[in-house]
Image: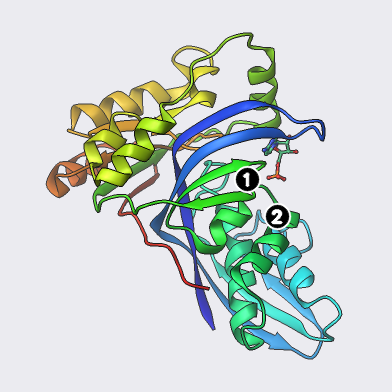
Amino acid sequence: MIVRAHAKLNLSLDVLGKAANGYHDMRMVMQSVDFGDDIAIELTDGDFHLDPGQPYLPSDERNLAMKAARLFLEGSGLGARMTVTKRSPVGAGMAGGSSDAAAVLRALNELTGRQKSAAQLCQMAEKLGSDVPFCVQGGTALVEGRGEILTELPALPDCAIVIAKPSFSISTPALFARIDQRKSRMHPDTTGILAALEAGELSGVARRLFNVFEDVLPRNYGDIPLIKSELLSFGALGAAMTGTGSAVFGLFTDEDAARRAYNSLRPRFAESYLTRPSPRLEV
Ligand code: C5P
């Protein structure tokens, strides 16, 4: 079976506080996109094997795809052979590794006769990482708690999406530490985004894109403001960094304008993409 691991974007990202377990209490609107890794997967008599698709990625338990396969098949006597075609950028805030893990859970559920419900898959996903539960079904969702409380939202109206990732990545724990040090900070208008999604208004969503992590980065940090202003100058309705970065994206109604923005960014940012929103998957 070949399964697609859709990458995700954050239409909003808010950190509400720090929980007793050390994790942060989040409130985010997430959106899956129409590109990502492909994973070819087959069951075995008990052996586990992973080709991670890139020499710099681990093929053992440090890879979430392997962790997911072992967790799903625990106690069954079965194993899995997996080959990843890697397309999602690494260290981008686009859930590259998390979406691989979620895709493995979905695929193994299919291959073993669909014995698990979406809720059961999400419980497993939560053990693998905070972004994995959303990635099981994707689409458009409000994601709260550590990442495990999901509320399906009306789909983001179809649009063109341009993404560009600067060559550096940002450390997730370091970003959370910066948030913790801040006494006051801005928050996204999550209520406004939810209302705009309900009304099917792309522009209402796009002008409210906001990520609190972007707000705690040093001023003019590593091309992020530059990519944003370039996306806006080409006609994006809104632009923001996704997750803990460093990828930045813009939403466009005009496909030609999006292509012009992509063509302009691509020579400087090799990891640039032109894509669309992708719908929620049935499990
Ligand atoms: O859950 P995951 O392994 O993806 O989290 C990676 C790191 O991000 C955690 O060790 C923690 O430092 C931070 N994190 C957090 N609060 C969350 C999600 C992640 O503090 N809700």
* Residue at image point 79% right, 91% down: 45
Q: Which mark is residue 96?
A: none
Mark 2 = which residue? Answer: 126
* Residue at image point 50% right, 49% down: 89
Pointer 1: residues within 10 angstroms few (<14), some, or many (20+)? many
Pointer 2: residues within 10 angstroms few (<14), some, or many (20+)? some
Q: In the picture, which quadrant includes the N terminus? A: bottom right
Decide: is 268 above or below 3.
Answer: above
Decide: is 278 above or below 268.
Answer: below
Q: For this view, does 244 lie left or right of residue 162?
A: right
Q: Is mark 2 within 8 Å of ligand 1?
A: no
* Residue at image point 20% right, 26% down: 233
Q: How far from the left and from the top, in percent, is residue 109?
A: 63, 79
* Residue at image point 65% right, 31% down: 171
Q: Could you tell me if residue 250 is visible in this image?
A: no
Residue flagged by tag 2: what amino acid is it? Glu
Residue flagged by tag 1: what amino acid is it? Gly
Q: For this view, does 252 lie left or right of residue 65?
A: left
Q: How far from the left and from the top, in percent, is residue 64?
A: 70, 59
Mark 1 = which residue? Answer: 147
Quadrant hosting residue 210: top left
Q: Could you tell me if residue 112 is visible in this image?
A: yes
Q: For this view, does 197 lie left or right of residue 104?
A: left
Ligand 1 image position (quadrant): top right
